[in-house]
Every structure is written in C-alpha cells, then in structure tokens.
Image (cartoon, rainbow, N blue to C red):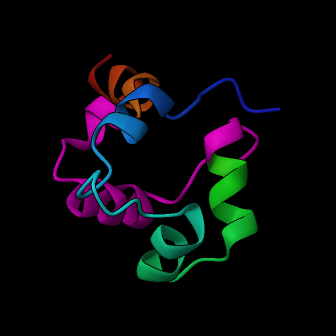
C-alpha cells in the first residue's frame, strides 16, 4: 500500500459548485480515467501520475502540492 494519500478533505472542499454535486465518476471521466482508478487514488492505494495530479489540481483549481503534500515534500528534499 502506498503511504502517500491525496488530501481528501481538500478534494471534498473544492469540488466544483457544491449546489450541483460532482460525483467521483464525473471527475474521473473529466480526467480520462476510470472511476475505479480515481477511487484508488482517494483511498491511497495508488498514486496518480504527475500528469493526472496536475489535471486534478486544475479541475479543482488548487495547487498540486495541496492535494498531494507528501509528494511535494519529497521533491523539495
């Protein structure tokens, strides 16, 4: 199991337009990945590629290092 986990609280906080909820499946489709792959990212069982980390951050309008703090810390060390 991967030790790095996506910041799920931030993911929930920054989902687009809370009045119209966006499902995990819709986010996955937008990113071009399966719902199952996205679920594994949320559970910390897989780490998305750098490209997918960037796509997700752009979709949510947040910084990549906010969603994946452990990955960012490793890069600066």
Q: Is residue 34 above or below residue 42?
A: below
Q: Residue at position x 59%, y 77% from top?
A: 33
Q: Residue at position x 49%, y 32% from top?
A: 8
Coordinates of residue 39 in the picture (x, y in percent): 69, 54
Q: Nearer the viewer, residue 74 or 27?
A: 27
Stretch in magenta: 42-67
**Image quarter of residue 35:** bottom right
* 46 is within the stretch colored magenta: yes
Q: Is residue 19 left or right of residue 3?
A: left
* 51 is within the stretch colored magenta: yes
**Image quarter of residue 54:** bottom left
Q: Residue at position x 76%, y 41% from top?
A: 45
Q: Nearer the viewer, residue 54 or 39?
A: 39
Q: Quadrant of the N terminus?
A: top right
Coordinates of residue 11 in the picture (x, y in percent): 40, 40
Q: Is residue 13 left or right of residue 63?
A: right
Q: Residue at position x 75%, y 66% from top?
A: 36
């Amino acid at each position: 199991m991967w030790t790095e986990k996506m910041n799920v609280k931030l993911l929930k906080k920054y989902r687009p337009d809370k009045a119209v909820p966006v499902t995990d499946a819709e986010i996955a489709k937008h990113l071009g990945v399966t719902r199952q792959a996205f679920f594994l990212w949320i559970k910390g069982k897989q780490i998305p590629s750098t490209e997918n980390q960037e796509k997700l951050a752009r979709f949510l309008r947040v910084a990549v290092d906010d969603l994946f703090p452990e990955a960012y810390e490793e890069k600066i060390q």
